[in-house]
Image (spheres, rainbow, N blue to C red):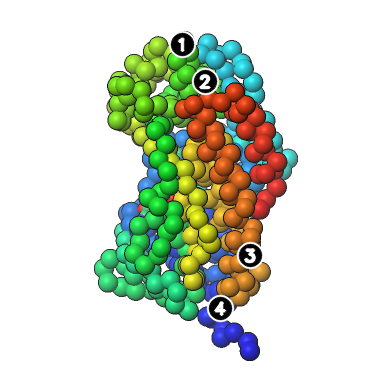
Amino acid sequence: MRPEPGVTRLRHVGIVGAGLAGLAAAVAAAAAGVHVEVFDAAPDVAAPPAQIDVVPNLVRDLSALGLAEACVRRGFAYRGVSVVDAYGRAHFEIETPALGGARLPAAIGMPYAELLRVLRDSALARGAVVHWQCTVCGVEAPAARPHIALADGRRHRFDLVVMAGAADVAGIELPLHAGGERLPQRWDYVLLPRPQGLDQVTWVVGPGRTKAMIVPVSMREAGLALLRDERMAGAPAAGTPAQLRAALAVEGDLLARLGESLRDDATVVGRPVRSGLLAGAWHVGAVLRLGSSAHVLPPHFGQAAAQSVEDAAVLGDLLRADLERDELLARFGARRATRAARVHALVSQAARWDLDPEPATDLAALARRLAPIVAHGA
Ligand SMILES: Cc1cc2nc3c(=O)[nH]c(=O)nc-3n(C[C@H](O)[C@H](O)[C@H](O)COP(=O)(O)OP(=O)(O)OC[C@H]3O[C@@H](n4cnc5c(N)ncnc54)[C@H](O)[C@@H]3O)c2cc1C
């Protein structure tokens, strides 16, 4: 028997969350010709004043969504990743292949908000509707046509609901408990003037094992991310510019100079490090989980964002194939689950290694193991 039209074929998709994963999914689904509605509790794109590192596999997937050129215009195309000591002496380089093709740079540093705006504007231009200030308080998953219930009492019915980064919505069992395991480390992010000549991402390892990552995001600005080991006595719960400056002052010339360039009124954003991966299927009935609803990745190798956009790219691809819903959900899991698990394992190992270095696993070795996994699209 042929399935009832409009029930199993996907014409109308509802997305909960307008972060990276939700907006990228909206772009991909709208480009596939599907009617898309996105719901977010915030009044507009809510991005921390921090950098986002658009790594090679993310450049490739943004290019497939037609967005890479806009990212180049709004960011800083950088030419590689260098790991240096506290005085700027090179340890090694991390390979940065141009996966987006010869016309695009290998990687791009951007202010986080700029990437979200590129995604939002593209979703709107392709006809997606974004409902800001709409808190979703429940989703009825098993229904043939699932409902999204809003806090104001309205209900919306879709062929498929996508949970994108929004974890605590009633009605959906999320085996990714409380956003995954909390590691005893935190990264502090701040935007500061771009150091003269900085044209690549630079990881600095200070004498006290302090690690910092500096990403150029525009001609004028760079983003600094500083690792804090929360097990250390006296580690502040949240950094201020003065605390960051004091921490950087004792970590060699390079970091001390960065600290001095920090403005007193700069906003420092703390990012607690979590690691988690969905246990079992990525969908419950007609509700599919993407982005940080499905995988929570530590900051290493820029894969938290890259894997979120990869989720969206695969969804768009499958929607274009005009599959029945069950077939689409099965194929989505087959293309994403194992691959995301392999990336998750390597990135989480890098985060654990920051806390307790193991001789057999260094950053360069992990980067070399990650490279072939992400070298080709999902
Ligand atoms: C400071 C900082 C810097 C980062 N830098 C990098 C980087 O360089 N590289 C990298 O790979 N990753 C980075 N990340 C991580 C990256 O931001 C996440 O992996 C990514 O945001 C996951 O996207 P998401 O859409 O799944 O979730 P989110 O971005 O968290 O978006 C979820 C959205 O859902 C909305 N929402 C939640 N609950 C509800 C509800 N009930 N109803 C309606 N809306 C709801 C929220 O308002 C939010 O907009 C950084 C994170 C931070 C905080």
Instruction: Please state which of the two labelled residues, at mark 3 or mark 2, is closer to the viewer.
Output: 3
Q: Does residue 319 lie above or below 81 as drawn?
A: below
Indicate the position of residue 13 as horizontal and vertical percent values: 49, 69
Position of residue 175 measured from the top left corner of the image (x, y, whole percent):
44, 57
Q: Residue at x 63, y 65 (%)?
A: 331
Q: Badge 1 local density, few (<14 within 10 Å), some, or many (20+)?
A: some
Q: Position of residue 12 (x, y in %)?
A: 50, 73
Kindly check if marks 4 and 1 are in contact, taking CB atoms under 8 A apart as contact. Answer: no
- Could you tell me how far apart the alpha carbons at marks 3 and 2 are, in whole angstroms? 41 Å
- Could you tell me the amino acid type at mark 4? Thr
Q: Is 83 located above or below residue 10 in the figure?
A: above
Please name whichever residue, 251 or 125, is drawn nearer the observer in this view of the structure. 251
Dot 3 crowding, Cα within 10 Å, few <14, some 14–19, many 20+: some
Asked whether disc 3 touches disc 2, contact meaning CB atoms under 8 Å apart, the reply is: no
Q: Which residue is mark 4?
A: 8
Element at label 2: strand
Viewer-nearest residue: 264 or 73 = 264
- The residue at the point 41 percent across, 49 percent down is 179
The quadrant where residue 346 appears: top right
Label 1–label 2 contact, CB within 8 A: yes
Q: Is residue 278 left or right of residue 172?
A: right
Q: Which residue is mark 3?
A: 331
The three-letter amino acid code for the residue at tag 2 is Val
Sequence order check, earlier mark of 4 and 1: 4
Tell me the quarter of the image containing the N terminus.
bottom right
> Residue at 32% of width from left, 21% of height from top?
233
Q: Earlier in the sequence, mark 3 or mark 1?
A: 1
**SS category of the residue bearing label 3:** helix
